[in-house]
Amino acid sequence: MSTLLHLDSSADRTMSRSRSITAAFASAFSAAGPGNVVVHRDLHADPLPHLPDASLHWAAGLRRPGAEPGQAAEALQQRLVAELLGADVLLVGVPLYNYSLPSSLKAWLDHVHVPGLTAPSAVSAAPLTGRPAVLVTSRGGNYDAGTVNEGRDHATPVLELVLGEEMGMAVSVIAIGLTLASAVPGLAAQAARGEREYAESLRLARELGERFGSASSSRQRGAGPEPLPRT
């Protein structure tokens, strides 16, 4: 039995391609092994508060003397961290909003990136080292090298940095572009390419969901299949 923590953050509840692709992954993961569990958190439908106190950036043993973040705020953070630590695989839907993360996803990240709990520090190791994290990133336009949008995706690098470099997770990226090609006249000539990318992303999501879902649940994090390269 393996557990998937599935996060969605798109504000579009009906036409979102990031939601469609994460759903394909989660369905394949669930079907791949008897007893597999999917914990779904919709960060848009049930948004988290912004981090209410700066001391919550740190585990209790690293906070300044006298820090009192509040019982309710600390309990919420502990619940979110426990969800992450209890999952064998993390799946995150990441639509690009104004070239960056949806604020709902940023709030979750601020709650769970905690030196001393989920990131290494003087008082802790790195409990998430090697654990798979799959990012499904969707972008409305064309972000290819040489285009005006080259380098303007400021969401994916942040997640790769925090989840991967800081927290030690093994990050894979399924990236889709041109999701607005059918709605924006200036992108209409690339609509067919956008549809091909969407179909390929669905295929990759199902493949990776099945691979991770069928991996051993021995809790030896990182002993599962190698992450896919960025698409």
Image (cartoon, grey):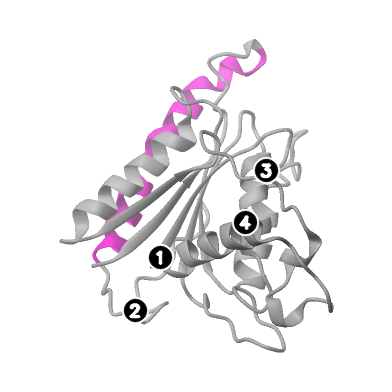
Q: What residue did someone put label 4 on?
A: 72
Q: What residue did someone put label 2 on?
A: 219
Whether pointer 2 and pointer 4 mark residues with C-beta atoms closer than 8 Å, the reply is no
Whether pointer 3 and pointer 1 mark residues with C-beta atoms closer than 8 Å, the reply is no
Looking at the picture, tell me which residue is in the foreground, 224 or 54.
54
State the residue at coordinates (61%, 46%): 105
The amino acid sitting under disc 2 is Arg
Looking at the picture, tell me which residue is in the foreground, 142 or 26.
26
Whether pointer 2 and pointer 3 mark residues with C-beta atoms closer than 8 Å, the reply is no
Residue stretch in magenta:
186-214
Q: Which mark is residue 101?
A: 3
Note whether 92 is above or below 148 in the view shown. Answer: below
Note whether 105 is above or below 190 in the view shown. Answer: below
Between discs 4 and 3, the one toward the N terminus: 4
Note whether 122 is above or below 66 in the view shown. Answer: below
Number of marks: 4
Q: Where's residue 231, x and y in %? A: 50, 50
Whether pointer 1 and pointer 2 mark residues with C-beta atoms closer than 8 Å, the reply is no
- Quarter-wise, where is residue 64 in the image? bottom right
Q: Residue 87 carries which label?
A: 1
